[in-house]
Amino acid sequence: MELIPMDVGPLNPPVEGLAAAVFLFAVCHLVVRRLLRRIDRVLEARRQASDGVRRQAEDVRAQAEDVRAEVRAVLAAARHDAASVRRRAEEEGAALIAAARADGVRQVDEMLAEAAARIESDRRAAEAELRGYASELAVELAGRVVGEPISPASRTPAAETR
């Protein structure tokens, strides 16, 4: 028995073959539909797992950014503290150098004053000592100039007044 009463070749299948094809199509459709439902469930579970992991990754990334910001803030504060410590140390060092320089200048001034006083006292002592020998040295020099020895007793009163 044929579906179309005319002869159209292979386009006119027998009714039994068509019924078997429809039955097999329905069975295949049900099997594939069940497989597709399972595939859809697996894909949905996979999507949900991916979304969950993605959310977790975003949360971890946000936490990492927060920690990074905190670390940067701590580093900035540490750099600031280090700079202030360096500045204070430089100021203290400069103050110590200035104090040492002033102390050195004061000591040099004291030493120069002591040396000047000692030189002045030595000069006065030497001058006083030489004044005692001045008349003897003058007589001896005069004798050398004249070429004859001159005695200290032969001095003239005019020479003594000078």
Image (spheres, rainbow, N blue to C red):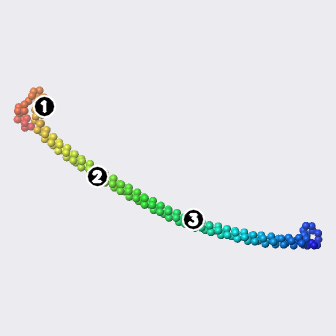
Instruction: Name the residue at 17% across, 42% down.
Output: 123
- Label 2: element kind: helix
Seen in the picture, residue 42 relative to 79 is either above or below; the reply is below
Circle number at residue 25: none
The residue at which mark 2 appears reads as 103
Residue 18, x across and y down, in percent? 88, 71
What residue is shown with label 1?
Answer: 141
Sequence order check: which comes first, mark 3 or mark 1? 3
Q: Which quarter of the rendered picture does the C terminus lie within?
A: top left
Amino acid at pointer 1: Leu
Query: N-terminal of the two: label 2 or label 1?
Result: 2
Q: Is residue 162 above or below residue 88?
A: above
Q: Residue at x 53, y 66 (%)?
A: 66
Q: What's the CA distance linking mark 2 and mark 3?
A: 62 Å
Q: Residue 97 at x, y = what percent? A: 33, 53
Going by the numbered disc 3, the residue's amino acid type is Arg
How crowded pointer 3 is (Cα within 10 Å; few <14, some 14-19, many 20+) is rated as few
**Label 1 element class:** helix
Task: Tell me: residue 7, above or below residue 132.
Answer: below
- The tag on residue 61 is 3
Residue drawn at (78%, 72%), measured in percent from left and top? 30
Q: Are marks 2 and 1 in contact (CB under 8 Å)?
A: no
Residue 122 figure quarter:
top left
Query: Which dot, 3 or 1, sits closer to the camera?
Result: 3
Residue 42 in the image: state x and y as whole percent: 70, 69
Q: Amino acid at mark 2?
A: Asp
Residue situated in front as seen by the camera: 51 or 90: 51
In the shown orientation, is residue 9 left or right of residue 33?
right
Specify whether 23 is left or right of 62: right
